[in-house]
Image (spheres, rainbow, N blue to C red):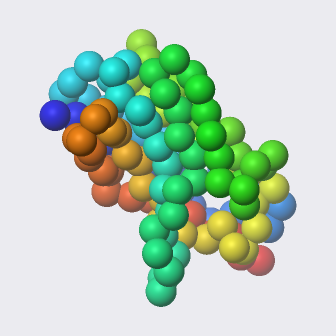
Amino acid sequence: QVQLVESGGGLVQPGGSLRLSCAASGSIFSIYVMGWYRQAPGKQRELVATITGGGSTNYADSVKGRFTISRDNAKKTVYLQMNRLEPEDTAVYYCQASRLEYSNWGQGTQVTVSS
């Protein structure tokens, strides 16, 4: 079992930046693949980025070159640095921990990109 709490969302203007954090507790953090997903109203939840325990990453095409996922296993925290934000990035962002068939989600944090 792992509990996840996201933070760092908010309102930002187009072209701005935010850094999301996901703090984990209750289990051994390093064994999980960590991911960020997002869901906008009326749309399916989509993968944004993932990072393995060893630091291998992958990104959705829509965020490549703008977003960076990272993790600090000692602090049991995963981050999503979001730069050059666009209105299309507006969504609730969710943190996920997964290992084999197990997965768990945080409660989500709202990101709104608007003038």
Q: Quadrant of the C terminus?
A: bottom right
Which residue is at 41% across, 32% downward?
33
Q: Could one spot residue 104 in this view of the protein? A: yes
Q: Is residue 62 above or below residue 18?
A: below
Q: Is residue 26 above or below residue 44?
A: above
Residue 32 appears at what percent x and percent y? Answer: 35, 28
Which residue is at 56% across, 64% downward?
111
Horizontally, is 66 left or right of 68 in the view? right
Q: Which of 97/85 is in front?
A: 97
Horizontally, is 82 left or right of 16 in the view? left
Question: Extreme bottom residue here?
Answer: 42
Q: Is residue 79 above or below residue 62?
A: above
Question: Extreme top residue here?
Answer: 74
Q: Could one spot residue 13 in this view of the protein? A: no
Which residue is at 30% across, 50% downward?
105
Question: Extreme front residue here?
Answer: 100
Q: Which of 87/29 is in front?
A: 29
Which image quadrant for residue 112?
Answer: bottom right
Residue 91 appears at what percent x and percent y? Answer: 54, 69
Q: Quadrant of the N terminus?
A: top left
Which residue is at 48% across, 33% downward?
78
Which image quadrant for residue 75?
Answer: top left
Residue 109 appears at what percent x and percent y? Answer: 44, 59
Residue 19 appears at what percent x and percent y? Answer: 62, 44
How many numbered circles are shown? 0
Horizontally, is 2 left or right of 42 in the view? left
